[in-house]
Amino acid sequence: MFPTPIEKTKPSIQLLYKIALPIALILWLLPLIAVAITSIRSAGDITAGNYWGWPSSFNLLENYTAVFTNSPIGQYILNSFKVTLPTVVGTLALSCMTGFALGVYKFKGNMLVFFMFVAGNFIPFQILMVPVRDLTLSLDMYNTTAGLAMFHIAFQTGFCTLFMRNFIKALPHELIEAARVEGVSEIQIFWYVVMPLMKPAIAALSVLIFTFIWNDYFWATVLTQGADTQPVTAGLYSLNGQWVASWHLVSAGSIVAAMPPVLMFFAMQKHFIAGLTLGAVK
Amino acid sequence: MRTFWKSNQLKLAPWLFLTPGIFIFCLYVILPVFQSIAISFYAWDGLGVKEYVGVDNYIELADDEAFYTSLKNNLIWLILYMLAVPAGLFVALFLNQTVRGIRIYKSLFFFPFVISQVVVGLVFSWFYDPTHGLMNILLNAIGFDSIAVLADERFVTYGIIVAGLWPQTAYCMILYLTGLNAVDPEQIEAARLDNAKGWRLLWYVILPQLKPATFIAIVVTVIGALRSFDLISIMTSGGPWGSSRVLAYYMYEQAFSEYGFRMGYGAAIAVVLFLIMMIYIAGFLYKMYRDERGL
């Protein structure tokens, strides 16, 4: 193991390490800790400029209730779910199929199709912006959560295909061969042989895509406007404009907006990291 | 029909599975790239009639000071964002221990990557706030004057990059932690027996084994740097006086904002950004091609 395991070092170093660890963590998360504390401050603290001292009172419930009653944040969050969940389902459905096709079959053009998906991943969003907005307008889906989800499904299919294809390629090919010898059709092989083995990949991609899409801001501003359709990232930005001096509300709103992906991450940490670090080990 | 499928299914099946994915991907991703390139030769407000103007948009771009500011900022982003890679390695090495509770520490260090860049941007604009921001309170405490980072042309881009480095470092850290897990312990022991330690051990034994992690870290950091949009939009809207714009933001501003709807000009900016990215895409695909061929 590198660096030297701390248990094998001098007791003084071990002690130092154990002290340094929490200090480093607090420094690292200081901006977030500040937001969390501010989100329970009173409006009085904010006007008095008491940002960093001890809060004069703890207004946890008041502030968080105020965020939900004084702003459409509930609607924003609902919109975020309406964009994120269909995207996760749609992307997984498409990329299980594309990944299967590219990972299992040898055919002319396999590499070309695969590279198209991979290259598409790296394209800067801005070059897609004008045509995608036009396309969404002409499909009558501008300013709808469905229109936003459609784009996300298409774009994320690139990354997910890369992931699924590599995952399926690493599965034992003999299984598929054996099924073919038995006369099982290709569609049945996909559904009954390969799909059950793809559960870890599906889990990893679901959390990853959920987080990516939940946190998307750019496409939300390009394809939606107004509280009826905008997801919470774009919503938070407009709330920030309205609550100019109400930092306690902005902070509480930020925390509410950040919650779903954070909970998702902690609940499915193993899968999340497995998805993110694909390719980091050979 | 049934027999036709039966005898040809090995040839037909892959295309059957690929069609929906390829269709939607081409419609929303591949085709728009070419449409944008086409639009960049027109003057268009997004609604009215497109007017063909040849390379006029590009000629205007070559004379546009704001374009060069954005290009320069993109370059600064690209260079400084790379700090996330060694910083991530450093944090990973710090956390690569097996003391009690280390798993929780690792997840909490990773935290900044999970939250939205909108929240990161809000948090940092507040950290930099000239009157109440923590940074200036600390500066004043040690006897310096306050700096309005986000309102000062000299500092603004660096200030935003620091905000971006926070989640990006967390991302690189997790890549390296996974990589470190897979480092061959026998090789380390052998190197230790040969009296290698510290930096030399890291440089000659560990880093070569972390190559795949480093590669991915560099790829995602380059993409992250060239995609920098959210933080700029949240923290400064490109200001003050456009000094923190990057190409991605400048394009958005030209195409869809109060400055007018110049789709053609915006598309031309996006094409330039795309060409820069193409260098990386080509490099990445080339490496992948070699790996696939097993060279």
Image (cartoon, helix red, strand yellow):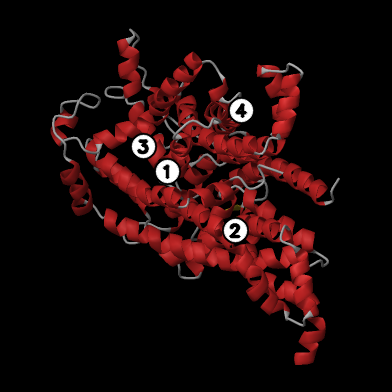
Within 10 Å of disc 4 (Cα), the crowding (few <14, some 14-19, many 20+) is few
* Residue to which mark 4 is pinned: B79
Question: Dots 3 and 1: beta carbons under 8 Å?
Answer: no
- Chain letter of mark 2 equals A
How far apart, in angstroms, are the residues tagged by discs 3 and 1?
A: 12 Å
How far apart, in angstroms, are the residues tagged by discs 4 and 3?
A: 24 Å
Q: Position of residue A213 (x, y in %)?
A: 47, 54
Mark closer to the observer (4, 2): 2
How far apart, in angstroms, are the residues tagged by discs 4 and 2?
A: 34 Å
Q: Quadrant of the N terminus of chain A?
A: top right
* Residue to which mark 2 is pinned: A201
Judge from the rendering whether residue A5 lies leftward or rightward of residue B288; answer left or right. Answer: left
Question: Taking the image as drawn, is residue B221 in sight?
Answer: no
Callout 4 secondary element: helix
Mark closer to the observer (3, 1): 1
Q: Are marks 4 and 1 on the same chain?
A: yes
Question: Taking the image as drawn, is residue B162 in sight?
Answer: yes
Query: What amino acid type is highlighted by mark number 3?
Result: Leu
* Residue to which mark 1 is pinned: B115
Within 10 Å of disc 1 (Cα), the crowding (few <14, some 14-19, many 20+) is many
